Image: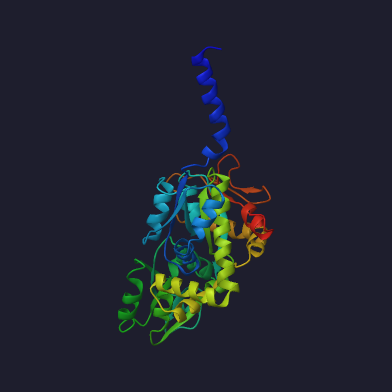
Amino acid sequence: MNLRNRIIATIIGVLMYLLPALSFAGESYRIAWSHYTGWEPWEYIQQSGIMNKWAKKYGIDKVEITLVNDYIESINMYTTGHFDGCVMTNMDALTIPAVGGVDSSIVVVGDFSNGNDGIVVLNGTDVKDLKGANLRIVELSVSHYLLSRALDLHGLTEGDLNLINTSDADIAALFVSEAEKDPKAAACTWNPLLMQVRNVAGANLVFDSSKIPGEIIDCLVVRSDAPENLKKALTGAWYEAMSIMNGHEQQGKEALELMAQSAGGTLAEFKAQLKTTRMFYSAAEAAAFTNGAQLKETMEYVRTFSFDHGLYGDGAPSKDLVGIRFPDGSVIGDTNNVKLRFDATYMSLAAQGQL
C-alpha cells in the first residue's frame, strides 16, 4: 500500500471510530411555546437548566425553547420549518401543520382544559339563553369548538346567535364596555380572559370545558422525522419539571413563582388557573390517556368540526383528507395520508423510568 492509500485508510479508520460521537455533535433544535397555563412550565424548563441537562444526556448540543407571543404565529412558524417542535392544542395540530402537509407527532400530552375555556352571558343562566345573543369569540379557535359542542349539547346552532369575530387581545375590554348597553352581550374565551369577563356585574358562566373533559388537549408537537434523542430529551425534561411542580414543596413553589411571573400574574392567580387545568403530572397518566378509547371519539368530534368550518381548506373532499394515527396503530381518515400521530412511546418510557 503506497503512502497516499495509507493516509486515506487512516483517515477513514479515524472517521469510523468517531462516527457515533460525530452523529450527535453540533446538533441543535428549536422549540416554540406561547403563554398558557399548561405551557408555562417550558419557561421554567429553559431557565432552570433542566433542558440543558437532558439535551446533554442525549448528546444534543442545544435545545432552544423560544417564546412566541402570538400563539397562531408560533404554529405557522413551526409549519413553515422555523421550529422543530411547538406547543399547541390537538385541534390546531390537526388543522394547521397536519392539514398543511407536515407530518407531526404529539409526543407529550401535557394537560387538558378542565374549566379554562368557557362561555359567559349577561342576564342568563343557561346555554339556551345564548339564543339571540351577540357573542364575541376568536372564530375557528378552540373556543369556537367549545361553543359548537355546547350548542349541539343544548339543541342550538350557530345560526341562533350572532358571532362577532374578535381578537383575544380585545375580547375582555369590549365585553366590559358592551355590558353597559347590550343586555344580550356574551363572550366565549379562555383564561385569564375568562376570569375577567366573569367578573362583570350580571355576567354568568353558562358552559365551560369541564363539561367536555379531555377534548381540548394541550400538547407538545414535533416533526415525526425528528430524531429519537430529541423526543427523549424533551419528554425527560418535561416530566422532571412535572415532578418538581407536584412533589417538591420549596422547589415546586419557586418553579410556580417563576411561571406566574412569566405569565404576567401573581402566584395566587396562576394557582387558580391550574385548578381549571387538568395537568398530567404523571407520565403514566398521560400515556394511559393517550392510549385510551376516549381520544378517538374526541378526535372524531374535532375533525368533524374542523371540516364543517372550512379548516381543511377549499376543495377538501371530506374529513377523511388527513389520517390521524393512534398509539394502537389504528387510523381515522386517509391511511395513505397520515399527518398527525399520537405517540405514547416517550411518555411510556418516562413512566417506566427508562429515559
> Position of 48 compared to 183: left or right?
right
Estimate the x, y position of residue 156 in percent, counting from the top left: 50, 70
> Position of 34 compared to 277: left or right?
left
Seen from the viewer's position, the closer of residues 55 and 221 is: 55
| Relative vertical location of residue 100 with respect to residue 36 in this rendering, above or below | above
Residue at horizontal 48 percent and vertical 58 percent from the top: 87
| Relative vertical location of residue 75 with respect to residue 7 in this rendering, above or below | below
* Quadrant in the picture for the C terminus: bottom right
> Position of 90 compared to 258: left or right?
right
Estimate the x, y position of residue 6 in percent, counting from the top left: 53, 18
For residue 6, say whether it is visible. Answer: yes
For residue 191, say whether it is visible. Answer: no
> Which image quadrant is residue 109 in?
bottom right
Residue at horizontal 50 percent and vertical 15 percent from the top: 3
Residue at horizontal 49 percent and vertical 74 percent from the top: 254
Estimate the x, y position of residue 105 in percent, counting from the top left: 55, 50
Estimate the x, y position of residue 320 in percent, counting from the top left: 56, 47
Name the residue furthest bottom.
201
Name the residue furthest front.
3
